[in-house]
Amino acid sequence: MKRFFLFICIFVFALPAFSQTENFGSWLTLGLNKDFGKKFGLSIDQEFRLKDNLSTVNLFYTNVGINYKVAKFLKVALVYRNIQKRKDDGFYGFRSRIYTDLSFKLKPGKWTLGYRARLQAEWRQSGYDNKNGNMPEVYLRNLFKVGYEVGPHLTPYIGTELRFQLQNPRLPWANGFDRQRIIAGMDYKINGMHSFGTYFLYQKEYNVNDPQTLYIIGLEYTISFD
């Protein structure tokens, strides 16, 4: 508990330092999980993202997904995401995303070693004046994550994600790796039902028009039902 509150203090005092850059933002997530037996599960997530020194709502989305535990170390999931994203003109456009996850997790002692492969397709819908709006952007995302349990409730972790573009109708020439994320965070399990997490995320784009670098502080709250 003392370590957790120490981390929260560091989080709060770090905000002014991050906010000195115009690329500072915050991602706020509420998750609901429900298990059906030992194999199947349902998840609903709501996320709210701020950018421009927390002055602008960049997007908000809702995830609805199902998952299946193939083995102790392997889980698959299928998720639909509805996105409302701010455009350059200040209005919001709708996007739909479908993705499937293949997640591996090993727990040698207090360590947690994880890898997640995500194949996603995203369509731009109403609110976008683009003849290619009905053609999906397709990406393969690879997430590597390492955590260490420092107590019965507290697990700090580090990770990195690499995104590989398979298809983009607006940039057909730019297939390949175009974004990397580096993340460091901490999860705190309050009890069997409630958990809380916070993290710092660094995101850098490349091989795209107008590449951006983002500095994100995230907060997550999850409620799990048996």
Image (spheres, rainbow, N blue to C red):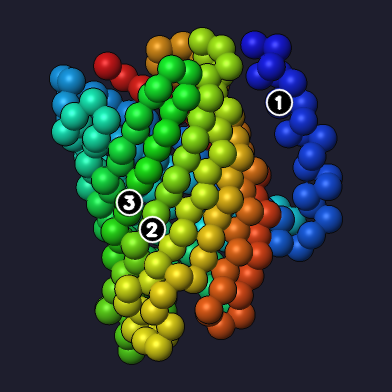
For label 1, the SS is helix
Is 205 drawn above or below residue 113 in the view shown?
below
| Residue 91 visible in the current orientation | no
Q: Amino acid at mark 3?
A: Ala
For label 3, the SS is strand
Real-space Cα distance between discs 2 and 1? Answer: 29 Å
Q: State the quadrant of the N terminus.
A: top right
Of mark 2 and mark 3, the one earlier in the sequence is 3
The percent position of residue 184, horizontal first and vertical second, equals 61, 40
Q: Amino acid at mark 1?
A: Phe
| Label at residue 80 | none
- Residue 88 sits in which quadrant? bottom right
* Residue highlighted by disc 1: 7
Q: Nearer the viewer, residue 30 or 143?
A: 143
* Residue highlighted by disc 2: 141
The percent position of residue 221, horizontal first and vertical second, equals 50, 30
Residue found 55% across the figure and 33% down from its top: 157
Q: Are marks 2 and 3 in contact (CB under 8 Å)?
A: yes
Real-space Cα distance between discs 3 and 1? Answer: 29 Å
Of mark 3 and mark 1, the one earlier in the sequence is 1
* Residue highlighted by disc 3: 117
